[in-house]
Amino acid sequence: METALDPARRLLREVFGFPAFRPDQEEIIRAVLRGRDALVLMPTGGGKSLCYQIPAMLRPGTGVVISPLIALMQDQVSALRQHGVAAAFLNSSMSHEERQRTRAALQGGELDLLYLAPERLLNEDSGTLALLRRIEIALIAIDEAHCVSQWGHDFRQDYLGLDVLEDHFPGTPRLALTATADEATRKEIVVRLRLTAAERFISGFDRPNIRYTVRMKNGPGADLLAFLRERQGQAGIVYCLSRRKVEATAERLRNEGFDALPYHAGLSAQQRRRCQARFQRSDGVIVVATIAFGMGIDKPDVRFVAHCDLPKSIEAYYQETGRAGRDGEPAEAWMTYGLQDVVRLRQMVDESEADEDHKRVQRTRLQSLVAWCEITQCRRAALLAYFGEQYPQPCGNCDNCLNPPKTFDGTLEAQKFLSCAVRAGQRFGAAHLIDVLRGRDTDKVRRHRHQNLSTFGIGSDLSARQWHAVVRQVVAMGFARVDAERHGALVLTPRARPLLRSEQTIELREEVRLARPRRASRPRPEPWEMAAADEPLWQALRTCRTRLAEEAGVPPYVIFHDATLKEFLRARPSTPESMLELHGVGQAKLERFGHAFLEVIAAADGADDDDPSGNPP
Ligand code: ADP
Ligand code: ZN
């Protein structure tokens, strides 16, 4: 007996080349096939697209997908076409003729999927809505549904108009999909898109393939270079806080031989488009960007996201790092930060135009992130806890789990520092207070007669670097805060009292090591730990993929994902049948590209068989 999902599973296997649905996908597809509306909240890379693509192919009529960005639309459509799916888009980048052709295909009932920007759908002059009302619609999927939220950073006016869809297409299942987390946004989506009757599918936020690492800033740029050198040829995003730093970092990386491009709001629209297209379409490009580089990114094989400066909040960090590893392969979220970042971000909040309530929220969010940076337990568990999710720690895939930090009773050090700040009138920043603690004879010390303070010189046993680590942690734990109005002065919070009275003790990270971490202790991402013998075939497979991608005018991952190339490497298929067994290989792709890869593999296997002595067999 066939169940409702069997045809869906068959499409998954034969068209997309995947053996099984992920648990949530199955539930969602079942609901949509029953004609239900759905609100889908799934982390980036969770596999939202299949949730509407497969039902659109199975239900009679065309599935309409509303998506905010033209560039993404084009990539999705070309990826679907490579799978042999009848998909098209309508947007302003097309010629009149192309548009006519798509309209004709639509009217002829030839399309399984049609991608549209919201403005095109709602614009009366385009006649799109009228056209869609004349044909059979399988479902309507609203991607990036959080764009409807006026409080979010991705707000799009046009999304507000999408509430009319219910009137025009009564009874047609509608899906709203997003990766954005919070409860308030979720409610707004339901109300504004009139999805009160929708089934809700809220998947967990864990991104198990992302490894989280946070480091203290060492020298400017040195850590980043060391990090990147171990990841030659991988695609990634490096975030910096300012345009100037973006430019400087990109140039430095280029000088070091990396294929790096700058991206920020100060570039022309054309420059930005070109940068995005290069990143999306080629292998191994690094984009150095301010947060302006964001939503348009739908590249599945981003192997790392590096933050050279602290992001604004845990939400922002989660969203930005979420751009790594959408293909489910191991990826890295790496960050360096220092107290100076906290000072700068506080300043930005304080000087912004926002009202006082808003600023308070921003400050709290920043503080939560700083605290997260300094925790000594599993980062993943803490990150998920922030979003209200339980995670059984340790995860084994974050810096704290891989190299558990040693801690020591730092109560005395914290007390020394806090009382020094009080004695100096809570008007000074970390650098000067540390000079006082260490008993240094500087102009500033003399100008303020701080050599007379009782705390002068009581901390000469620690280096400046060690003291900085203490200060950072004391701030992260909320015993003191940075007052941006007073140029980064450190001010005590009410929490400092019990600590100063020794009613409480604190544990500090013993990360005061002066030397750089030993090589052996540095975790290496496993996926690229490829046997040396496999390296030539791996490169040959990638070259083959690049060539096919260029011929087809699509990004390399549209031909086959990294995961599939690795399958080739592992299984070394020698026939089309054995290739079809592998993850990511469907019938259409096999016919189009299988042969080329089989040749590459056969050539490599032939070379392996050669007698190393060079003698003929
Ligand atoms: P999202 O839109 O949620 O960020 P996508 O729909 O782009 O995610 O899917 C992310 C990746 O996961 C894609 O590379 C996709 O091919 C892959 N994927 C989706 N569903 C499955 C599945 N059932 N089995 C294996 N891979 C899948
Ligand atoms: Zn962990």
Image (cartoon, helix red, strand yellow):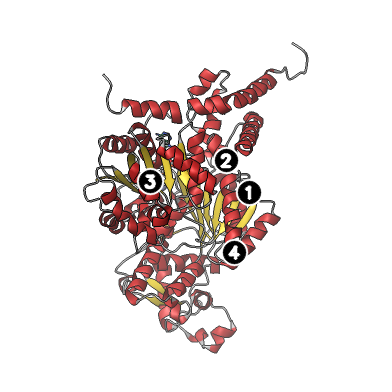
Going by the numbered disc 2, the residue's amino acid type is: Val
- Residue, x 50% and y 53% (percent of image)? 92
Q: Residues within 10 Å of mark 3 (few under 14, many from 20)?
A: few
Frontmost residue, 476 versus 365: 365
Q: CA distance from mark 3 to mark 2?
A: 29 Å
Q: Nearer the viewer, mark 4 or mark 2?
A: 2
Residue located beneath label 4 in the image: 267
Q: Residues within 10 Å of mark 2 (few under 14, many from 20)?
A: many
Q: Determine the secondary structure under disc 3.
A: helix
Going by the numbered disc 1, the residue's amino acid type is: Arg
Q: CA distance from mark 1 to mark 2?
A: 28 Å
Q: Which mark is residue 131?
A: 3
Mark 4 / mark 2, whichever is N-terminal: 4
Residue furthest top in the image: 617
Mark 1 / mark 3, whichever is N-terminal: 3
Q: Quadrant of residue 54?
A: top left
Residue located beneath label 1 in the image: 229
Q: CA distance from mark 4 to mark 3?
A: 38 Å
Q: CA distance from mark 1 to mark 4?
A: 27 Å
